[in-house]
Image: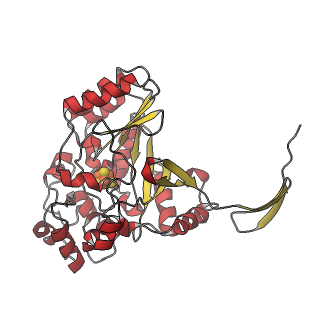
Amino acid sequence: MIFMRRFFDHVSEKDWLSYEWQIRNRIRTLEDLKKFIPLLPEEEEGIKRTKGLYPLAITPYYLSLIDPEDPNDPIRIQAIPRAVEVDEKVQADGDPDALREEGEIPGLTHRYPDRVLMVVTTFCAVYCRHCMRKRIFSQGEVSRTKEEIDRMIDYIRKHEEVRDVLISGGDPLTLSLEKIEYILKRIREIDHVEIIRFGTRLPVLAPQRFFNDRLLDILERYSPIWINTHFNHPKEITELSEEAIDRILRRGIPVNNQAVLLKGVNDDPEVMIQLSRSLLRIKVKPQYLFHCDPIKGAMHFRTTVEKGLEIIRFMRGRISGMGIPTYAVDLPGGKGKVPLLPNYVVSKKGNTFIFESFSGELVEYTIDEVA
Ligand code: SF4
């Protein structure tokens, strides 16, 4: 617990474990951040130049995970702006809405027939520098009004093919409990909606949110609910995030992890296998490893598809299949996800295949259909 309060020894345990305290005390300015960490020149410049475009916010908890001596600390890279975000090339190459999420009804995306995405707020505990929805950061911290939410829900009601509603943001679980309950209650009035999922990074950025039994009561009441979270590095799995996950799981809410492949953060097979091992230990399924989307202001986080495939190949045979996420790219123009796998079929003649085993051995195998 002492390590967890790095830079914040003076804060009482009660405050440290309070989500409201964490949100109230987010670090939002260059001056505040400098009190805790000696900044690199590109960070100082980054904070100045991204002001008003891609804001800065870091919870004391997430800040405390940074090793101040390490300029390449993976938490630091995800949380502290660098000048490269507004570099001309990074800006010119990226698209603010590469996945074409913006549609006719503000906040609602209906891409796959059976699923819709509701973006209900722009607020996040921490503004992750690699965020695929960076475009909404500059809109300020705003939540959808009741009328806007009603409009989304009316759409869902009229579309009987929708069985699954993903509520995201920003971070939807930062909304007030009243608003969370309102949304859930309205969705649950629709018979054809079977499951509700929340996309939330709070288990990583402010796990204290889940120490609130009223929130967990609400989530449990409107079950079946699933949580998709977003751990990117094993350093993010702490005593507190583990406790948050445990509390969620005890309410019958499964948790899947959707990591993003990020240059300088987790583009390393050893890091990714450690992440998967740690996730399995806390009973979170590593579901996806997404290739970083071509988002304006986040292009510098992109690495190659070969790197992603190398990571998946490395994991095979070293960890149970349960621990290997599906590596996927999101096609441009909102055309959906495509899973990518290393090629294990070296050749095929008739029904005889040459496969490459996890250890690299070539194995001949004839697979006949039994009539
Ligand atoms: S918490 Fe999620 S939505 Fe918010 S900035 Fe981070 S990645 Fe983006």
Quarter residue 263 falls in: bottom left
The coloring applied to the image is secondary structure
In the rendered image, the quadrant that contains the C terminus is: top right
Q: Quadrant of residue 29?
A: bottom left
Q: Could you tell me if residue 215 is visible in this image?
A: yes
Q: Which residue appears farthest toward the bottom when viewing the image?
A: 41
Residue 262, horizontal then vertical, whole percent: 41, 65
Q: Is residue 206 found left or right of 316 in the rendered image?
A: left
66 left or right, relative to 157? left
Q: Is residue 105 above or below residue 135?
A: above
Residue shown at the point (48%, 53%) measured from the top left: 331
Q: Is residue 297 above or below residue 230?
A: below
The answer to which of 305 and 9 lies nearer the viewer is: 305
Judging depth in this view, the residue of 128 and 257 nearest the camera is 128
Q: Residue at 42% across / 67% down in the picture?
A: 302
Q: Residue furthest right?
A: 371
Relative depth, front residue between 103 and 73: 103
Q: Quadrant of residue 117?
A: top left
| Residue 92, x across and y down, in percent | 32, 67
Tell me residue 73's x, y (percent).
33, 71
Where does the N terminus fall, quadrant-wise?
A: bottom left
The residue drawn where x is 31% and y is 25% is: 154
In the image, what residue occupies the spot 36% across and 45% down?
Answer: 101
Is residue 15 depicted above or below 215 in this figure?
A: below
Relative to 349, 270 lies left or right: left
Find residue 122 and report its horizontal and vertical position in percent: 23, 47
> Would you say residue 240 is visible in this rendering?
no
